[in-house]
Structure formats: C-alpha cells, structure tokens
Image (cartoon, helix red, strand yellow):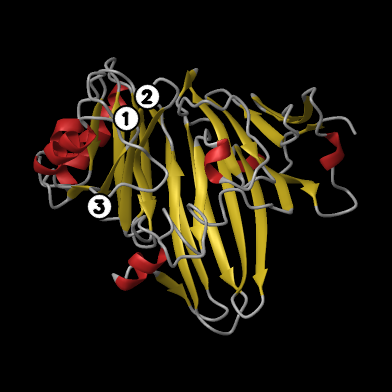
C-alpha cells in the first residue's frame, strides 16, 4: 500500500507491523520504503544485511532506528544532527542469542529474570532474556493531535512453573523536541508473585572534554566503583590502580579526559536523589555547552549504574542507567534484598526520557541537578 499521509483532523492512526491480516512485516527489505509521513516526520522500514528488521523515524529534530522484533532495541539515535549513540565494533545488529555478540545499540531493555553477570549458581544469561527477546507484536501509532509517534512492541515469556509475563515497550518520539520517551510495562500473568530485575542500558557516546553532572552526592559512598572483575573482561596493567583511585575520589571521572584509561570498562553504582516530582537526572555537557541527558521515574527504578568504556573499538557512556537492582547477578542481588517483585496478576511500569539539550536548556537542568543534590 502507499505511505499513510496524515491530514488535518485525523486524531491518530495505528499501523500494525505484525500480528494481524493487515500487517506489513513483509515490506521490510534491504531497500528502505516509506510507510508513513506526518508533518516533518517520515517513517521508513528496512532490513539490515544481517536480516534484522528496522524502523527509521526521521523528524525535524530527531532520527532514531528501532529494531521492533529484536529486543525492541533503539539501535541508533541522532538529535539536532548529532549522533549520540555509542561507538562499537558492530555497524549492524547481528542475529544472535548472546548479548556481547551484537553489543552496539543506543538503548537496550535488560532483565527480567536476571541482571548483570551471572554468578556460579545463576541460570540467567548476561543481562537476562530481554535484550535479544523476539518481540512478536509491533504497532506504529501516529498521534496527530500531540505531534508524536509511538512504536509499541510486546514480548511474551512463558516457562512452565516459573514465568508467564508480557513485557510491552513503548518508544514515543515528539516532533518538536530533541528527545524520546521510553516506557516498559510488565504484566505478571500468574497468580503468584514474580521476581523482577530490570536495567535500562542507555549507551551514550562519550565526548572528549565533556563534564558529567547528576543528582547524587559526589562522595565514595554515593558514587561507588565496582571493584569485582566480571568474567567477560580481562583488565590490562594499571586497571586495578585506577579502580582504587576512583574508589577514593570518584569525582576524578567527571571530566572526560581522553587520558583516563577506561579500558575495558569501569562500572559505578550511583545513589541518585529524586526531585519533588520523583524524577532524577543525569547529563553529559559538551565543550560547546550543549548536553546529552537522561531523566527517569525513580520510584519504579530506585537504583542506578554507570558504565564507561573507552577503547580503540568501543566508546560508550552509560552515564546513568536506571535499574531496580545492581548488576552482580540474581543470587547476589537477591541476598541483598534488591530484587523487586510483581504481585500475582499485577503490573510494573518504568518511565524515562533521554535526548539532547541546547546550552540554555543544559544550564537550566544543571542548576536543577545541583539544587536536588544540595550543591546550589
């Protein structure tokens, strides 16, 4: 069918990508095709050479690429002409069941049956089943009245005597803002409570000379560097010395100097402080005064992790990755009382925003962050 053209007076339009007789999943090909236009935004479908389907939403201030059936990942994100996604060794997503074999997306849902590096007694994979989950439902919703686009996807997981849940991811793209809104709703279909571990793995691109600001106290107690070494990394000489120095003075990493050897990675646990609305914030301010940011509802996401990697083939900054728990695996996090639960037939929802700010907007958010943390 020809592309949908939204006209004045149309309130919203839902385009099903899979799941009914009207769906258009067979239109994904290596050549991009336009499926909808509205205002200054165009939505294209295409398939990477690896076979993974993608939706490109290109508007006046943003351009994102979403993998609707592969974890509902946001593979790339560009705002006001600036690419903010991490640099990685993967130019395209790879069809695999191993998290590190296609590690290059801007945003990945992680969890839910486990999180982080699995311990000796854990049965989950690195960061759980959700990052590469096969989403089987996907809809594109054009909301003309509020100038936004929504890409919604659902994944159902069923394991006898263990799990029966539906995870619904919603990515909202406003036309007039350089940001996206991401939410995840998890519905427990069992009558018994469900353990839940979740982390929003948002991977920004670190910028030389940038500064990190976030609503936490800049102390070793509130910015705690991970001293344990996960099984999937092999640290070089000098790594342990850097870790010990960061443990004494975590503010050392706030100025992103290219001389700091975040090789292969450094991970922090952050004790974030929420504002009066229950949200907390983090930002990377570029040398020109503009900034990347992430904000989220801290009630459903009470913990936060920071991840930094700066190597020849990977440049990633998870400046504030909201979570329900830490990343030491299910058994350790459960022993610390940091595994959330959803009651029988209950729901859990997480909400967050991320994108770019101009210099004036960045200055306003920095003042707000300092006020929250008592630095004003």
Q: Are marks 2 and 1 in contact (CB under 8 Å)?
A: yes
Indicate the secondary structure of the residue bearing disc 2: loop
Mark 2 and mark 1 lie on one chain; the one further toward the N terminus is: 1
| Left or right for 175, reference 244 | right
Which residue does the image show at 70% across and 46% down from the upper left? Answer: 69
* Mark 1 burial class by Cα count in 10 Å: few <14, some 14-19, many 20+: many
Indicate the secondary structure of the residue bearing disc 1: loop
Residue under label 1: 263
Indicate the secondary structure of the residue bearing disc 3: loop
Which residue does the image show at 52% across and 33% down from the upper left? Answer: 104
* Mark 3 burial class by Cα count in 10 Å: few <14, some 14-19, many 20+: some
Which residue does the image show at 36% across and 71% down from the upper left? Answer: 334
Q: Quadrant of residue 274?
A: bottom left
Q: Is residue 93 above or below residue 321?
A: above
Label disc, if present, on residue 311 of the rendered structure: 2
Q: Is residue 160 visible?
A: yes
Which residue does the image show at 32% across and 60% down from the upper left? Answer: 302
Residue under label 3: 275
Cα separation between marks 2 and 1? 6 Å
Q: Nearer the viewer, residue 147 or 74?
A: 74
Q: Quadrant of residue 121?
A: bottom left
Q: Are marks 3 and 1 in contact (CB under 8 Å)?
A: no
Mark 3 and mark 2 lie on one chain; the one further toward the N terminus is: 3
Q: Nearer the viewer, residue 100 or 60?
A: 100
Q: Quadrant of the C terminus?
A: top left
Q: Nearer the viewer, residue 34 or 38?
A: 34
Mark 3 and mark 1 lie on one chain; the one further toward the N terminus is: 1
Q: Are marks 3 and 2 in contact (CB under 8 Å)?
A: no
């Amino acid at each position: 069918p020809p592309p949908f053209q939204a006209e004045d007076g149309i309130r919203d339009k839902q385009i099903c990508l899979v799941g009914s007789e009207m769906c258009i999943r067979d239109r994904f090909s290596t050549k991009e095709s336009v499926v909808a236009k509205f205002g200054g935004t165009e939505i294209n479908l295409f398939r990477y050479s690896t076979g993974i389907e993608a939706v490109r939403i290109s508007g006046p201030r943003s351009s994102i690429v979403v993998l609707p059936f592969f974890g509902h990942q946001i593979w790339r994100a560009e705002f006001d002409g600036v690419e903010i996604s991490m640099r990685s060794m993967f130019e395209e997503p790879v069809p695999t069941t191993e998290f590190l074999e296609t590690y290059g997306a801007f945003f990945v849902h992680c969890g839910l049956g486990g999180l982080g590096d699995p311990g000796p007694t854990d049965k989950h994979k690195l960061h759980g089943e959700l990052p590469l989950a096969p989403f089987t439902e996907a809809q594109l919703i054009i909301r003309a009245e509020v100038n936004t686009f929504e890409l919604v996807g659902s994944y159902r997981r069923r394991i006898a005597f263990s799990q029966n849940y539906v995870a619904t991811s919603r990515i909202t793209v406003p036309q007039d803002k350089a940001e996206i809104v991401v939410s995840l709703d998890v519905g427990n279909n069992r009558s018994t409570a469900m353990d839940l571990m979740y982390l929003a793995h948002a991977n920004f691109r670190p910028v030389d000379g940038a500064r990190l600001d976030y609503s936490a106290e800049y102390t070793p107690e509130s910015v705690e560097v991970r001293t344990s070494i996960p099984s999937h990394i092999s640290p070089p000489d000098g790594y342990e010395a850097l870790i010990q120095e960061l443990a004494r003075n975590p503010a050392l990493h706030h100025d992103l100097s290219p001389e700091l050897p975040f090789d292969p990675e450094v991970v922090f646990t952050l004790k974030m402080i929420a504002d009066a609305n229950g949200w907390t914030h983090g930002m990377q301010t570029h040398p020109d005064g503009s900034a990347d940011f992430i904000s989220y509802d801290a009630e459903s996401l009470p913990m936060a992790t920071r991840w930094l990697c700066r190597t020849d083939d990977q440049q990633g900054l998870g400046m504030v990755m909201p979570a329900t728990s830490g990343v030491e695996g299910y058994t350790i996090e459960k022993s610390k009382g940091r595994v959330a639960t959803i009651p029988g037939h209950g729901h859990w929802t997480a909400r967050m925003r991320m994108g770019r700010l101009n210099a004036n907007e960045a200055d306003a958010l920095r003042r707000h962050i300092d006020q929250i943390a008592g630095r004003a």
